[in-house]
Image: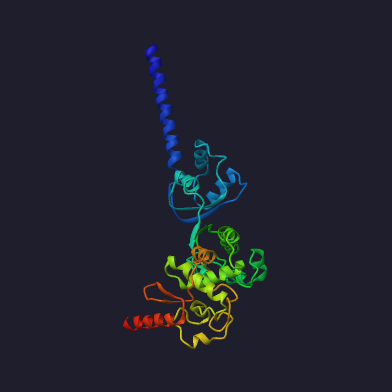
Amino acid sequence: MNSSKNQIIANYLSLFLSIVFIAFTIIISTNNHTISKKIITIEKGKTLNEIIDLFHREEIVKNKFIFKSFIYLNNLQNKIPAGTYLFEGKISNTSIINSIFSNGQISKKITIPEGSSTERVVDIILSEFDFNLSEVELLKDKKFLDSIGIQFSSIDGYLFPDSYFFHYNESFESIIQKIVNEFEIRVIPLFKEKQINDMSLHEVITLASIVEGEAMIDEERAIIASVYINRLKKNMKLQADPTIQFIVDESPKRLTNKDLKIESPYNTYLNFGLPPGPINNPGLKSIQAVLNPEKTDYLFFVAKGDGSHVFTKNEKDHNEAKKNYKNFLRNQ
């Protein structure tokens, strides 16, 4: 008799476990389908039901009850964070949760190379985001520049070269603010720690942009900086080719004598001292080079043709170096 009861209990238990297994399998597997890219924002304060309704409207979830059961089975009902997420390809209950908790909030990566012009930075941003012209025009808005701490007529020099991650729904204003914030975080402490020659921050960045335009080898940056600082001390014109490249229409190009006579406050062949502002957005190494220049007596340098330069202390040696460089170009 007991054996018969035990068998009945065992049969019921087996049936129960089978039902649970089947139900669990249904909950796990239901909602399997394929979708094109969907970018979904879960706003802060949304309830679980509101989130599930959103997913259902966007066709990420097909069966709201099954998905909600899956959420409760995994004890996630109070843990879904606000944010913007990407869903694409083969979708299941599990993949939805993985997209939120494992993959995390989506972002776009933007890399600004050292020495990029502001126009180039804008092009890089526009290659990833669909902003309109009125938003980009913010960079010419003095009120906007003041609001992000730029006290000059141009943002040139303050778009710090680095790699950045942004949300898909990021605004142009927010992107620029974050890039300028990175400048403040990375550069301002260095400037305060190592101020030289009574140069203002704007002057340091301006000179660093010239160094960035000249240097191809990291080891030479501090030497190039020393040359320009030495010339400034002696009230010599900087005669920096990158400042001419900044004002010519077709740049970069091989400069001519005519180019060197272009009337512009940025023409360091005609004007003494630094130009009015940066000619590009210099990287950290060039900024550090200006803040920590080599101690040299060099007043001139000329390219050797391999990316490096010949540094000289007087015009005679400089002319000889220029002659050698011209011979190098003729032999190419």
Q: Is 138 left, or right, of 115 in this rendering?
A: right
- Image location of residue 58, percent across then percent down: 52, 53
Residue at image location 46% in from the left, 83% down from the top: 255
Q: Is 102 left, or right, of 201 in this rendering?
A: left
170 up-or-down from 263: above or below: above
As drawn, which residue projects farthest toward the top?
A: 1
40 up-or-down from 245: above or below: above
Identify the image's colour scheme: rainbow, by chain, secondary structure or one colour: rainbow
- Image location of residue 294, percent across then percent down: 49, 66
As drawn, which residue projects farthest toward the left?
A: 331
Camera-nearest residue between 268 and 227 = 227
Quarter occupied by residue 15? top left
- Image location of residue 42, percent across then percent down: 57, 50
Q: Is 226 left, or right, of 11 in this rendering?
A: right
68 up-or-down from 167: above or below: above
Q: Is 182 left, or right, of 217 in this rendering?
A: right
Quarter occupied by residue 160? bottom right
Camera-nearest residue between 36 and 15 = 36
In this orientation, does residue 280 appear?
A: no
Residue at image location 63% in from the left, 67% down from the top: 150
Quarter in which the C terminus is drawn: bottom left
In this orientation, does residue 46 appear?
A: yes
Residue at image location 43% in from the left, 65% down from the top: 219
Quarter in which the N terminus is drawn: top left
- Image location of residue 306, percent across then percent down: 36, 73
Camera-nearest residue between 106 and 322 = 322
